[in-house]
Amino acid sequence: MIQIIGSPISPYVKKVLTLLLMKGVDFEVDPITPFFGNDQFTELSPLRRIPVFIDGNFVLNDSTVIAEYIEECWPSPAALPGDPNLRAQARWLEEYSDSKIGDEFIWKSFAQIIVAPFAFKKEPDHAAFEANLEAGVADVMNYLEKQMPDEKFLVGEFGLADISIAAMFRNMHYVKWGPDEKRWPKTAAWLQRCEMQPALAKANEWSDALFTVKPPERRALAEKIGLKLTTETVMQREARRGPMTVIG
Ligand SMILES: N[C@@H](CCC(=O)N[C@@H](CS)C(=O)NCC(=O)O)C(=O)O
């Protein structure tokens, strides 16, 4: 049985869960927040980041590496286009999402407002968050609006580029921000279409439910909402910074 370590609230975990759901692959989840991982988590994830993919003794890190592996093992339905140019474009959009959108939506927004106060007892800087909505976040939105098609999805059928980027928007929803339909109409419409796709809708449903409780209670809630859990967890109670942590 495939195991995924990481809470569905993380957009990088959500990317992987959405792909597995879309391809009908069975999996179990250990829904931890990376800052609450124990020593075994460090063994499995040297950067102390989620997601981690485990299949027996085979362990993979990084959502992009995991997504490529999933695509190669379970090619249907395809998450990347067949045409090499379109495939490369989809990969670029995934990379833009993982790096630039992750920086603006996750580190400067979600992590500052939600994660830092809970995990590291650090007061959120609301002024910096608000200022960044008109700086880094608006830059991302202006770029995305130029990439958006009038209908359907970013690179043809619903796939990895859409999943990676749409997952990031859910974390902005948790800090009570959404795309202005007048300013970025194509992006707002595309996001609605993505969130109606069954696999992403299911992953968002799990994430929304888990977001209503604090990390220590998430495992119990995950079981109630129908996530298959791993028998063991790599969670501990005290928060720790990882080698890549940029908050706290
Ligand atoms: N490039 C990585 C990024 C993963 C990542 O940053 N995950 C966050 C959770 S949203 C994390 O584990 N952060 C912990 C840290 O950086 O200390 C991927 O695609 O998997």
Image (cartoon, rainbow, N blue to C red):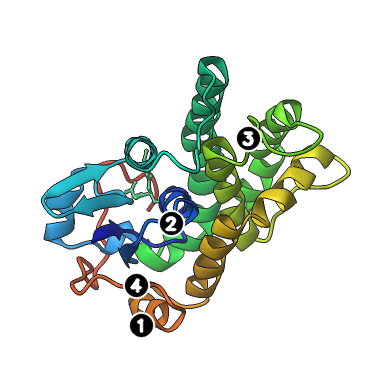
Disc number for residue 235: none
- How far apart, in angstroms, are the residues tagged by discs 3 and 4? 37 Å
Compute the Cα span from label 4 to label 2. Answer: 14 Å
Q: Amino acid at mark 4?
A: Lys
Residue under numbered circle 1: 220
Amino acid type, label 1: Ala
Of marks 1 and 2, which one's residue comes earlier in the chain?
Answer: 2
- Circle 4: is it few (<14), some (14-19), or many (20+) Cα within 10 Å? some
241 vs 107, left or right, is: left
The residue labelled by disc 4 is 228
Residue 184 visible in the shown view: no
The mark lying in front, picked from 2 and 3, is 2
Residue drawn at 53 percent across, 54 percent down = 110
Marks 4 and 2, the one that precedes in the sequence: 2
x, y percent for residue 61: 26, 42
Above or below 73: residue 219: below
Nearer the observer, 123 or 103: 103
Q: Crowding at label 3, few (<14), some or many (≥20) Cα neighbours within 10 Å?
A: some
Position of 91 with respect to 242 (left or right) is right
Badge nearest the viewer, 1 or 4: 4
* Amino acid carrying mark 3 in the image: Gly
User: Count of labels shown?
Assistant: 4
| Left or right side of 23 for 5 | left
Residue 136 image label: 3
